[in-house]
Amino acid sequence: MSTIEWLLDSDPSIRWQVMRDLTDASANEIAAERDRVATEGVGAQLLSLQADDGSWGGAAWNHGWDSTMHILLLLRDLGLDPAGMQAHVALRRVREHVTWRDCGPEECNGNAYFEGEIEPCINGQVAAAGAYFGQEVTGIIDRLLAEQLPDGGWNCEAERGSTRSSFNTTICALEALLEYERQAMNRSDVRAHRLRGQEYLLERGLFRRKSTGEAIGADRKTGAVFTDFAFPTWWHYDVLRALDYLRNAAAAPDPRIAGAIALVESKRDDNGRWRLDTQHTGTMLVTLGDAVGQPSRWVTLRAMRVLAWCATARGTFA
């Protein structure tokens, strides 16, 4: 079985993205496969678990991976069609009923879900999924723009005095700004802030210290290793997530990511697949079928499309 055949022998959420990003399937074939995300497999399972109060896990956000925020992020990763009936129904329930009561700072208790709370990492995740699903998240976006630090990134610790950005928070903010930028195309200020944040990552080669060029071994706060690939990523940063963001943003390949691309290529096994290096701890409502240390369809899909994006401009990495 070729790698593409192996990827296609999977959940609709993977199949439609493989068809779009790695094959010459027609637009109609891709759309038909995408429609199945809402009615079959992991996507359908997640939709069926939404409570009558519009929430998942009984909360807007929690420390596990089963809250409303986490499930909406995962549905975005799966590519649930925002225009589909199932998405409309699920998002209406969230919009009309879910608030931040008892799961965020006390001053945010009365906030509707898509108004967000105060931490840029959490707000970035709320806004990324919200904008993807066509919800009104302008308030969160404006807050993120105001919270960008002088070095170009973001950090949840800024309110406690930190002046240096965090890879973790920055990638969450960038994904939110990119999704919103597509929804509000007249916001040139959003693009300008996003490109500043993007430059923060590029200046560091996506995983190196700006001061020395030394590879960052692990996140100081969590111990997570930036060169280990995970799915889902949640709020955690890794090199493949950053590259997939750049691909999604249609960024011009930059010589400063040559080391990151080499890292991705080095992780491909003899069968042309990539393994799941790590899985962030938490409560998952569904099983995605990947085991740590074993070939992962999700990691392989993302790695292959990143390399395909770069293949057309290989000379820029000299």
Image (cartoon, rainbow, N blue to C red):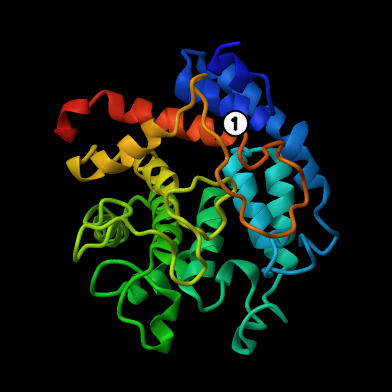
Q: Which of 71 and 28 is in front in this view?
A: 71
Is 160 drawn above or below residue 7 in the view shown?
A: below
Q: Can residue 195 be seen in this view?
A: yes
Please tell me which residue is depicted at 68% across the width and 25% down the height of the picture. 10
Q: Is residue 82 visible?
A: no
Q: In which quarter of the image is residue 240?
A: top left
User: Residue 131 in the image: x percent, y percent?
Assistant: 51, 54
Q: Quadrant of residue 111?
A: bottom right
**Callout 1 amino acid:** Pro
Q: Nearer the viewer, residue 37 or 133?
A: 37
Is 93 drawn above or below residue 6 in the view shown?
A: below
Check disc 1 and report its element: helix, strand or loop. loop
Please tell me which residue is depicted at 53% across the width and 60% down the height of the picture. 235
The residue where tag 1 is placed is: 295
Q: Nearer the viewer, residue 140 or 198?
A: 198
Please tell me which residue is depicted at 43% across the width and 66% down the height of the picture. 169
The number of discs equals 1
Q: Which of 229 and 312 is in front in this view?
A: 229
User: Residue 139 in the image: x percent, y percent?
Assistant: 47, 71
User: Residue 184 in the image: x percent, y percent?
Assistant: 39, 53
Is 171 drawn above or below residue 33 in the view shown?
A: below
Quadrant of the rendering where the C terminus is positioned: top left
User: Residue 261 in the image: x percent, y percent?
Assistant: 32, 37
Is 258 drawn above or below residue 15 in the view shown?
A: below
Crowding around mark 1 (Cα neighbors within 10 Å: few <14, some 14 to 19, many 20+) is some
Extreme-right residue of the structure: 52
Quadrant of the rendering where the N terminus is positioned: top right
